Amino acid sequence: MSVNCFVDTNILLYSRDASEPAKQAIAAALLDELWGNRSGRLSIQVLNEFFVNATRKLDPGLSPEEAWDDVEALSAWRPISLDMAIITRAYAVNRRYGLSWWDSMIVSAAEASGCARIYSEDLSDTTSYFGITVINPFKTT
């Protein structure tokens, strides 16, 4: 049985970033695995960040139509909405762990989604937040 895994924006972006072929291959393989075992989770925050950065910061960037197609496909992962409960828990994460507000929102949404893992390049690899372990798929051992 697979465990739910939260995917941070940077993983989604690398899966579409032709300027980083090594990271693109790793991110694409990870997403394929999560699609296959239906364990991928994310939040509305992640989808918003993905759309903006995929259309404005990737080089070459995605067209708005291409980015929207990805957002629509990822909606199958039941993105968690941001509400007062998520924000309140994010505040607790921020106070306890000293993470940035946006990273605190990621941890809070992952917890609310019942995730055991967060795949992210931004958070510290192997660190655990409220029992959720961060995995940086790009980190070499």
Image (cartoon, rainbow, N blue to C red):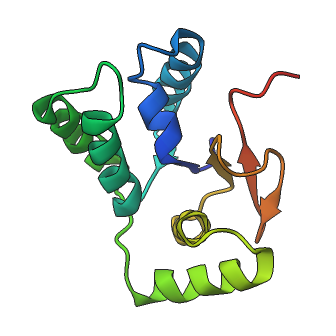
Locate residue 107 relative to residue 61 in the image: left or right: right
The quadrant of the image that shows the N terminus is: top right
From this view, report whether residue 93 is shown above or below residue 29: below
Estimate the x, y position of residue 24 in percent, counting from the top left: 50, 18
Residue at image point 68% right, 55% down: 116
Estimate the x, y position of residue 38 in percent, counting from the top left: 46, 39
Residue at image point 37% right, 83% down: 83
Which quadrant holds residue 72? top left
State how many labels appear: 0
The quadrant of the image that shows the C terminus is: top right
Residue at image point 48% right, 21% down: 28
From this view, report whether residue 128 is shown above or below residue 36: below
Locate residue 82 relative to residue 20 in the image: left or right: left
**In this view of the protein, can residue 45 be seen by the observer?**
yes
Which quadrant holds residue 130? bottom right
Q: Residue furthest left?
A: 65
Estimate the x, y position of residue 3 in percent, counting from the top left: 63, 48
Front residue of 100/1: it is: 100
Locate residue 65 relative to residue 93 in the image: left or right: left
Locate residue 46 relative to residue 7 in the image: left or right: left
Q: Residue furthest right?
A: 141
**In this view of the protein, can residue 36 be seen by the observer?**
no
